[in-house]
Amino acid sequence: MKYSRVFINSLAYELAPEVVTSAELESRLTPLYQKFRIPMGQLTALTGIEERRWWPSDHMLSDGAIVAAQKAMNETGIAAADIGAVVYTGVCRDQHEPATACRIAAKLGVLKDTAIYDISNACLGVLSGILDIANRIELGQIKAGLVVSCESARHIVDVTIDDMLADPTMQNYARSLATLTGGSGAVAVLLTDGSLNLDTDRNHQLLGASHLSAPEHNNLCQWGLKEVGPQLFREFMRTDAVSLLKEGVSLAKDTWEHFLEQRQWVEEEVDKVICHQVGAANQKQVLTALCINPEKEFPTFKLLGNMGTVSLPVTAA
């Protein structure tokens, strides 16, 4: 994919207000840790994550996305009438119907001919949204579009801790540990064709993109609902962290090589890279496999955890 008339004019974000430390989460797991003689501090030791942020329990996801979107609009001075598409791309959403983007678009005051819809693609949602809007701009369908997202880890972490205490096995601990890294935040990415004379000095051109997939590994990390009784469902999340890291690094290497080939670049020419923020082990193995100097990457997981779709754009901002 190559683009000739697409610019990223704003990366705006809103961080959740409540700081939750890894030590706090581990204290809630004291009976499990004592049973298996797991030393406190293991979560930070394994992931490099010291704290993450959460929204209040009554927070609506669209509210966070609205704040981030308004920041992007205020920063650039773009008029709502100039926005041709609003795309919500979070893993978390307000409800199944309507699209979470609908409430966001209504609050922003966009016109009736604005395209409004949700995109779901796990932690790649915002990146998928950026390419979707970029394609619309490159085709001349719109002059500007907003990609928005808001993620919340509070509920799934609470549910997971309850489940770990109810089923105190090492197997359950291993497949639940990744969930405890979850953080919360919101982001808005404004893309334009560069013709709107916006009030910003941020006018980064989007040159191109590459994407590869390995859908056969769809069972390595799952988040959804499971039936626990007649007409009774409970949220769950489970991760095969070892296999996910192995297969993820392999796919990242293939994709990076494909990207460099398509762009006719070499690694030494790349000044800065931003990884999805999962944890220290993941960061180290990905950068090693891609032969990228760690000094070129800017990590945020230590204080923000894994915010899903929001992690990469917030880190880039």
Image: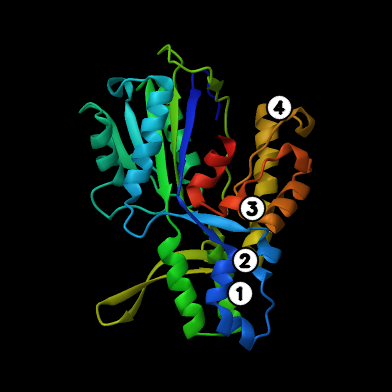
Residue 264 bears which disc, if any?
4
Identify the amino acid type marked 2: Ala
Tell me which label, 3 or 1, sits earlier in the chain: 1
**Residue on which disc 3 sits:** 302
115 relative to 46 in the view: left or right: left
Q: CA distance from mark 3 to mark 1?
A: 20 Å
Q: CA distance from mark 2 to mark 1?
A: 8 Å
The secondary element bearing badge 1 is classed as: helix
**Residue on which disc 2 sits:** 241
Q: Nearer the viewer, mark 2 or mark 4?
A: 2
Camera-nearest residue between 67 and 172: 67
Q: Which quarter of the figure is the N terminus placed in?
A: top right
Measured from the top left, where is residue 280 in percent x and y? 69, 55
Q: Are marks 2 and 1 in contact (CB under 8 Å)?
A: yes
Q: Name the residue at 49% across, 74% down.
A: 161
Rendered view: 314 above or below 82:
below
Measured from the top left, where is residue 41 in percent x and y? 67, 69
Q: Classify 10 Å Cα crowding around label 1: few (below 14), some (14-19), many (20 and above).
A: some
Q: Are marks 2 and 4 in contact (CB under 8 Å)?
A: no
Q: Name the residue at 45% across, 28% down.
A: 134
